[in-house]
Image (tube, coloured by chain):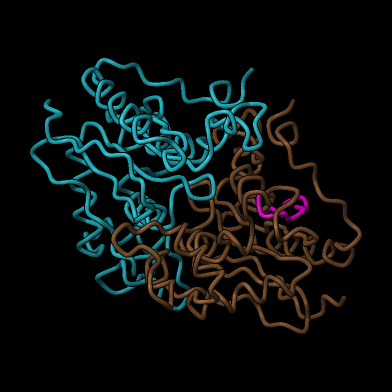
Chain colours: A brown, B cyan
Amino acid sequence: MSLASLRVTVPESSGPPAPRTNKTAHPPLGRIQREEYPSSWDMAGTLSNPGFFNYGVETHKAYEKRSLSSDIIEEQKKLQEADLVIFQFPLYWFSVPAVLKGWMDRVLCQGFAFDFPGSYDDGFLKGKLAILSLTTGGTASMFSKTGVNGDFRYFLWPLQHGTLHFCGFKVLAPQISFGPEMASEEERKRMVASWAQRLKTIWEEEPIPCSPPWYFGQ
Amino acid sequence: MSLASLRVTVPESSGPPAPRTNKTAHPPLGRIQREEYPSSWDMAGTLSNPGFFNYGVETHKAYEKRSLSSDIIEEQKKLQEADLVIFQFPLYWFSVPAVLKGWMDRVLCQGFAFDFPGSYDDGFLKGKLAILSLTTGGTASMFSKTGVNGDFRYFLWPLQHGTLHFCGFKVLAPQISFGPEMASEEERKRMVASWAQRLKTIWEEEPIPCSPPWYFGQ
């Protein structure tokens, strides 16, 4: 598997991020349109229960009937073909920006990414790797156990465990570029270089143990 | 302060949530339009640096020039007038649905909700209370320390500490209705009744201590 096509950039502006795959045969995961919050527009066919709209139920049924909107189907195809998914984003309010949250809410639907049973280690995206690569506004010391923002691992829980692990992904240690906006040009270059260096051997990395002690232990 | 106007409902469907204030003189905080992710459209005037778009910088400057888009200004006014803000939402991926994340990303901008200095206990919304009232897909035991989802307090960190506390809010203990979709009609009624009961004396409640031990302690 080649990594030649990976664009490694530290986003210094805060535009909408787009997750992307690292399989060279495939384009980056699509840039989600800004009008795409979860809604009844995500179902191309008729609703199962139009009188009592339940987004989770409707997307689940639409997935089974193959009647999800075409952009969701396309994103799901790219995910299915990917071995490793890199989520590159600036941290907004200790989480992903809304546009990427919309991607998660819409694309990772029941039936496709998980079911009951079929979550966590049995999630339907098992066998795949995921990694969060993010930039923060705060410095590393602000995101330490004694810093004002608390340990950076705390805010990773909903994303890495509640979302990625829930869908079956094995999660690699996050790539965090702390405070690029406040850093010098030279420091920013070092951040990019260390990420590029890491990518060379990323296929050899072991996933993190995705359980509470990794996040909240001493 | 009267609470008479508060609609207390357990959302059984998963439509887009809208945060709302509890001051009777004011309408609920607006329902955010689905096309409203953070973007350059949030600035009504010219951009400060159109050649290098930085959302955080631009909204900060637009706030100071009073040139944010009118819907953001309206939401900010309602927040300023509120004593207690209730965020009612269904838990999507251990967090708020994208539409509510968009509201946070857009409305709580630098200059209005915080600045440097001016965060956490000095955040600009200090003196106000906030409470998360949410419904989950999983049961309470799934959201316990030994449950598959981990303790429910874990996923509250980015929202209560990283967002609300960051902006100066004091945070009341969350109101969590676990698994209403799987519950009987009678159980759902009990969830609503207990919330209604709590609201009668909510002004007498003490905020939680918003620091790591409350979230991750033993």
Q: Is residue B20 left or right of residue B190?
A: left
Quadrant showing the C terminus of chain B: top right
Q: Is residue A26 on the magenta stretch?
A: no
Q: Residue at x 57, y 76 (%)?
A: A73
**Camera-side residue of B100 and B170:** B100
**Camera-side residue of B24 and B39:** B24
| Residue B202 visible in image | yes
Q: Residue at x 45, y 78 (%)?
A: B51
**Camera-side residue of A209 and A125:** A125
Q: Establish if A80 lies above or below B121.
A: below
Q: Which residues are magenta?
A: A166-176
As drawn, the residue found furthest toward the left would be B25
Q: Residue at x 25, y 32 (%)?
A: B84
Residue B131 image offset from top left, x and y in percent: 35, 32
Q: Establish if B20 lies above or below B66.
A: above
Quadrant showing the N terminus of chain B: top left
Residue A63 image offset from top left, x and y in percent: 55, 69
Q: Residue at x 24, y 60 (%)?
A: B65
Residue B27 image offset from top left, x and y in percent: 13, 46
